[in-house]
Amino acid sequence: MAKPRVFISSTFYDFKQVRADLDMFIESMGYDTIRNEEGDIPYGKDEALEEYCYKEIKGIDILVSIIGGRFGSESKRSHSSISQIELKTALKEGKQVYIFIEKNILAEYETYLLNKDGDMKYRYVNDVRIYNFIEEVKGLKANNNIKGFETASDITKYLKEQFAGLFQRFLEEQTRIKEISIINNLEKTAQTLNKLVNYLSDENKGQAEEINRILTINHPLVETLRTILDIPYNFYIEGTKDLDSLLVARGYRNTSSGLPEIEGIYTWAKDTNKTSHQIKISTELFDKEGKLIFVKKSDWNDEYLQYNEFEIADLEDLPF
């Protein structure tokens, strides 16, 4: 099973224990950790060792960059350190990046900004190029998520929240993919119906009933749902199955009773924050087979579709 690969980038000796703690945390999450000192990077014989670190970053998913007071080994590429170029490589490759900087360095960084044009010595860094690099990272327009830290637990706590957020976003995108699939199917149906409209209009001008069935693409029910659900694109509903798929994809659940034909309504509901949303649609809009019946705009009755919002009571506000 494929696992997310997390690269830990930092100077080594001052963060040896932090790197080990992060390794344990990442492994506990079920992810793969990439650490230079553990032999996780395959080195070749044709290039400088640091180049293989940069190549490894191309195959990772997340890079955790830890910046402290030591500049570290200088790269053969430039006057930057190897850990700085590792971060630059991840940013260039568009990887998910998390940057952690020791809090005392972040505090002294403000002093650096006021005096960077002068000749000053700084307490918490052994090379002013560290502050030069922080300034460069802070100047990025995107993917420069920076967090101050004091201990490894500060980093692991923040990463745990971020990893959970990434997973939630993934689930949300999966729901969106399902919705897009429904949209694509509706678009194909609309294209076919458009061709049939043209055919029936030209060849069967007397078949008003058939034309009206095809023209349900402009049904008042569709237009009303488009407004309520804030859908910016056109879509088509053929019957109750299409209607249920559309509403479920928008986060609603079917709450209809076992015999909606007797009660005369189909119902759907969803809860967001402290608000409950309810949609009621009359069964009069559908025939016995669940197909949508064409209704002219002039014959549309607002009672056919009712949308309501209710405030959900907070348990702390209840009198018991």
Image (cartoon, helix red, strand yellow):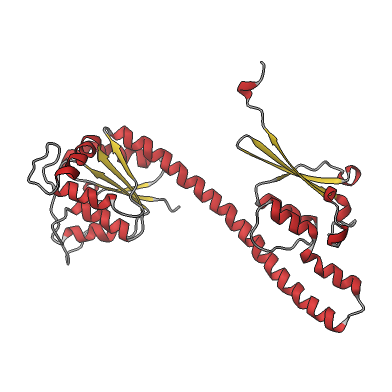
* Residue 144 visible in the current orientation: yes
Q: Nearer the viewer, residue 220 or 239?
A: 220
Q: Residue furthest bottom?
A: 203
* Residue 242 visible in the current orientation: no
Q: Nearer the viewer, residue 140 or 102?
A: 140
In the rendered image, residue 241, in percent from the top left (x then y), is placed at: 77, 56
Say above or below: 164 vs 287. above
Q: Quadrant of residue 279?
A: top right
In the rendered image, residue 312, in percent from the top left (x then y), is placed at: 67, 31
Say above or below: 51 vs 103. below
Say above or below: 42 vs 159. below
Total marks placed: 0
Residue at 90 percent across and 70 percent down: it is: 209
Residue at 12 percent across and 49 percent down: it is: 117
Q: Quadrant of residue 47?
A: bottom left
In the rendered image, residue 186, in percent from the top left (x then y), is placed at: 70, 65
Position of the C terminus by quadrant: top right
Q: Is residue 114 left or right of residue 137?
A: left
Q: Is residue 177 left or right of residue 55?
A: right
In the rendered image, residue 270, in percent from the top left (x then y), is placed at: 68, 42
